[in-house]
Every structure is written in C-alpha cells, then in structure tokens.
Amino acid sequence: MGYLFYETGGVEAGVDGFIEIRDPETDRVSNQTLQFQSKATTRRLPGDSEAKFHFPCSDKDIEYWLSGTMPTILIVTDLEHDIAYWKDLRAWFNVPANRASKRVTFEKVEDVFDASAALAIRTVSENGRAGSYYPPPRKQELLTPNLLRVSRLPETIFWAPTEMKTAKQLWYLVRQHDKYPDREVILRENALLSLRDLDTHPWREVCDPGAKEEFDAAEWAFSEDPDRERIFVNLLNLALQQMLSRDLRYDPKHRTLYFKPRSGPKKRRFEYRANLRDSGRDVALPYFKKKDKSQIAYWRHSAFSWQFLRIGREWFIQITPTYHYTRDGVQRDKFEADHLAGIKRQERNDAVRGQFIMWRELLISKSQDDLFGSAYPHLAFAPIDRLEADFGIDDKFWKASEGKASATDPGLFG
C-alpha cells in the first residue's frame, strides 16, 4: 500500500499498531493515522462459508475501539490460506444491529486486506477526531431521580355493567348529562370500571347501578395478573389527569400534560417553593409575530410525560419534563417539532432538573389541602431522597464540548 506500519509492542489494551498514510508518489507522510487490532488463526473461521465469515468481539473491546479519537480497523488473518481481511470498526459498530450482535462480518471478496484496499484505508483515516481525550477526574455526586413515590392510592374500584359499546358513545352520552364529567372511568367488556361511585350522577345514567360491585383497589394495585395491573395503571393515568385538570391540559398525541395559558396575551407564571427558597417559572409563554407584535405566533407550554411504575410493594411515578407548542393554547403549532428540537439543544442538565423540581412541587401541592379546597382523594405524591453516588463528572468537563444552539433559534429564550 505504500503506507507506514508501526507495531505497538509490549503491553497493549486492544490495539496492536498504527498505520500512517503516505503518498506513494511523493513519499510525503500526512500525519493521518489509524490504529489496528490484528487477529490470526489456523483454525476454521467462525461462520465460514464461500462468501463470508464472522469474528466475535467482547463488549469491553468494542467500547475500547469506539471511544478513542483515532479510527480503528480489525484485521483477521487466515494463516492456513495466507490471506487477511479488514473492517472499519467505527463504521461497522455504529449500526445498532451490528453492535447488538457483538460480531464483525467479513465479506471474503470485498474485505481482502491487500494493496487494493489502500484507497479505502486512506478514507477511513480521514474520519479521525481532532485532538485528544482525557477522562475527567471523578467526584462524589448527589443524584436527583425523576421519581416521586405514590403516597396515596385509590381505595375502591367500582364496577357496573353498561350497554355502551364504545368509549366514544359512552363519553358522548355522559356529556349530555354533565358537560365536564370526571375522568376516572374506563369502558371494558360491556362494563364500567371507575374510581368514582357509579351510583351517582352522571354515571348512573349510562350503566346499571343496581348491579354495581365494589372491589378493594389493593387487589388490583398489587395483583400478579398483568391484565388487572394494566387496568389499574389506566385508572391511575386518568386520575392524574383529573387531579391536574384545573391547571393542565392533556395532549393525547404525545401523552403529555401541559400548562394552560391565561386568557389574553399575558404569560402564565407558576410560583413555588423549592430547596427552602421561593422560585418561579414561566409555564405558558406567548411568542409574537415579527411583523406584527400584536399577533401571537405560538405558545410555549411547560409539559411533562409520565409513567407509573410498581417496585415491590410500592408505586412510583416517573416524570420526564418537556415542552408543548400550540397556536392558541389548544391547537398544536405546525412547527412544534422545530421549536422543541431548538430548546432541547439549548437546555442542559441543570435546566431539566429545575423543571422536574417544579413538577415535583406541583404534584406534591395537589396532594395536600389548601385554601381552595380539599386534596384530590384518589392520588397523592411524596418526594424521595436524593441518591448518593460514589462517582460523577464535573459539569465543566462536558458542557464546553456540547454543541451550542444559535441565539436566533425560535423558542429558546424568554
């Protein structure tokens, strides 16, 4: 190939040498280098056929090869037939299916390691990462899990037969009797399951209250029957929506809850107390058209997705902060994906943690009585302790290397 070839010699951790690219016409070396791992065998190659074979790799080796700043190739030599093959490991293992298989597949015609591979080898060397990487010093760290403990679960599940065939039919008829009905009701196999007493208005109008049955909700919450557990989680999801319905609106497409805007063009701000001090956040913020500052282009809403998790004999809720974008507080903005991508590029770990703390304080406050009324009866949340880790990474070592969003990106500031 006309390239320079250096063996490491002595102790090595997964690299046997280096190849430096040289111009065969001028003999000029380029300082473009790649590293190689060499394997040789007299045994039959794994998965050997006329067209291909594969070579197994350990997770440790794969991680080592991919984490460096220099491209790495794997060279496998068949000593019995005096022929070698090669593969670009970074390109190969960047494919998730290849990474999962923990093996490198070699094509016997395309992957021969001889002079004909010179141009391809040179191309691989051009994909090196500039500079060097040194692991940052470790430190102890306190971690804030994005979990809350469910401190109050529903006590009773009500069941009653119904003639309703579809959820659409059920809710249409319910809203004929109550324009804003409670939500903690599901239709399943010609029956209603609810956290509300079905012998009350408006539910008695759409079921047979005389055949109503009551169950201890714990039978469902801690059942080993996956179908019963799914029903219980479904009721918890509806209970959460009902619990927050005064302040938040549900987006079924993304399965998120987001803050409703105030009436008019003014932003909505949520004040709360966190870490022994008062804090606040703009949770529904209008953005105005550039050409007409009196017209709202779109709204940005603080939002979160969630998942209920059962761990042993306890239930938890996992909170994932995000944002939601609308034209008017209800209809989704057609550029929501662009807005969301922009703000995700801008925000870092501290910002996401701050959002989680806000949602934590909101959910805990809804679990308690206040001046406006009693706490929601079917669901309550409590914080969990922070976790102490024996290692961590100082933020200054990774923040500087992350891409920065442009200040002109829409929806980032305000």
Image (tube, grey):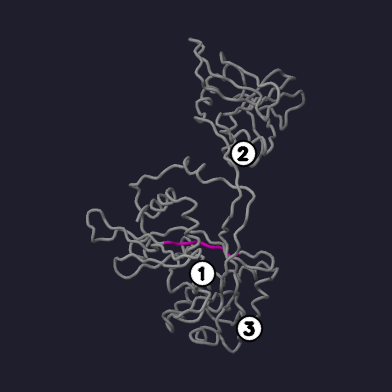
- The answer to whether residue 173 is seen in the rendering is no
User: Which amino acid type corresponds to the residue marked 3 in the rendered image?
Assistant: Glu
Which is more N-terminal, label 3 or label 2?
2
Residue found farthest to the top: 26
Q: Main secondary structure of the magenta part?
A: strand
In the rendered image, the vertical position of residue 124 relative to residue 170, given as above or below: above
Foreground disc of the pair 2, 1: 1
Residues shaded magenta:
302-308
* 10 Å crowding of disc 2: few (<14), some (14-19), many (20+): some
User: Which amino acid type corresponds to the residue marked 1 in the rendered image?
Assistant: Leu
**Residue at coordinates 33% horizontally, 47% vertically from top-left?**
408
Nearer the observer, 76 or 44: 76
Which is more N-terminal, label 1 or label 2?
2
The residue to which callout 2 is attached is 98
SS for tag 3?
strand
Residue 294 in magenta stretch: no
User: Which amino acid type corresponds to the residue marked 2 in the rendered image?
Assistant: Asn
Q: Residue 214 bears which disc, if any? A: 3
* 10 Å crowding of disc 3: few (<14), some (14-19), many (20+): some
Which is more N-terminal, label 3 or label 1?
3
Q: Residue 405: x, y in percent?
A: 39, 45
Q: What is the C-alpha distance between the residues marked 2 and 1?
A: 43 Å
Residue found farthest to the front: 276
Q: Residue 24: x, y in percent?
A: 52, 12
**Residue at coordinates 22% horizontally, 54% vertically from top-left?**
291
Horizontal side, residue 285 vs residue 399: left or right: left
Q: What is the C-alpha distance between the residues marked 2 and 3?
A: 53 Å
The residue to which callout 1 is attached is 363
The quadrant in which residue 268 appears is bottom left
Q: Residue 187: x, y in percent?
A: 55, 75
Residue found farthest to the bottom: 210
* 10 Å crowding of disc 1: few (<14), some (14-19), many (20+): many
